[in-house]
Amino acid sequence: MPEALTLQGTLLGFDFGLRRIGVAAGQTMTGTAGSLEVVRHADQPDWRAIERLVSEWRPCAFVVGLPLDGDGNETEMSRQARQFGSQLASRFDRPVYYMDERLSSAAAQEQFVDARAQGRVRAKGAKRLDARAAQIILENWLQSQSGH
């Protein structure tokens, strides 16, 4: 697996959930990310949708949010997120990195509430929270790699 610091190009970030998986894309050069969409996850992830995103964005690696408990310990959900990451790696032959996501969902919710209060987002935008959380996860990972 290549060292994370040597990666250059596009990354896809994922906020893994049992019903939905938020997806974001980011650039190593700029250290920025943007939310893309939410992919269904019923019995298994919607691999067709993920394949479409991989084909479109051609990422050099993936970043998966790791839902740890308040003390930073692994949970059943983090084990499932790691399993999803392993599936990504084997299906698409790219490295997978993990990022502590404990604060990403709360930050996405807070940003949504602020945007809604300012009239920039309507209630239907709530379903995009998972994609926004993926963006925050990816941005945090990019910042951690740049030393900021």
Image: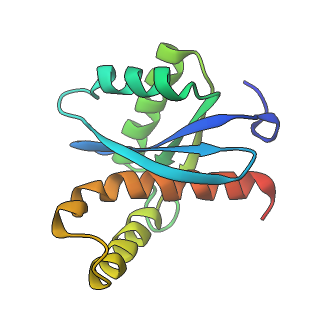
Residue at image location 21% in from the left, 43% down from the top: 19
**Res. 52 visible in picture:** yes
| Residue 121 versus residue 79 in the image, above or below | below
The percent coordinates of residue 24 (x first, y second) are 47, 45
The percent coordinates of residue 73 (x first, y second) are 50, 56
Q: Nearer the viewer, residue 130 or 84?
A: 130
| Residue 55 versus residue 12 in the image, above or below | above
The percent coordinates of residue 90 (x first, y second) are 51, 15
The percent coordinates of residue 144 (x first, y second) are 71, 57
| Residue 44 versus residue 107 in the image, above or below | above
Residue at image location 72% in from the left, 24% down from the top: 1
Residue at image location 71% in from the left, 44% down from the top: 28
Location of residue 140 by image quarter: bottom right
Q: Nearer the viewer, residue 26 or 44?
A: 26
Q: Nearer the viewer, residue 32 or 1?
A: 32
Location of residue 132 by image quarter: bottom left
Residue at image location 43% in from the left, 61% down from the top: 69
**Farthest-out residue, bottom:** 117
Q: Image check: 138 left or right of 130?
A: right
**Res. 74 visible in picture:** no
Q: Image check: 63 left or right of 24?
A: right
| Residue 87 versus residue 84 in the image, above or below | above
Which quadrant would the C terminus be assigned to in this image?
A: bottom right
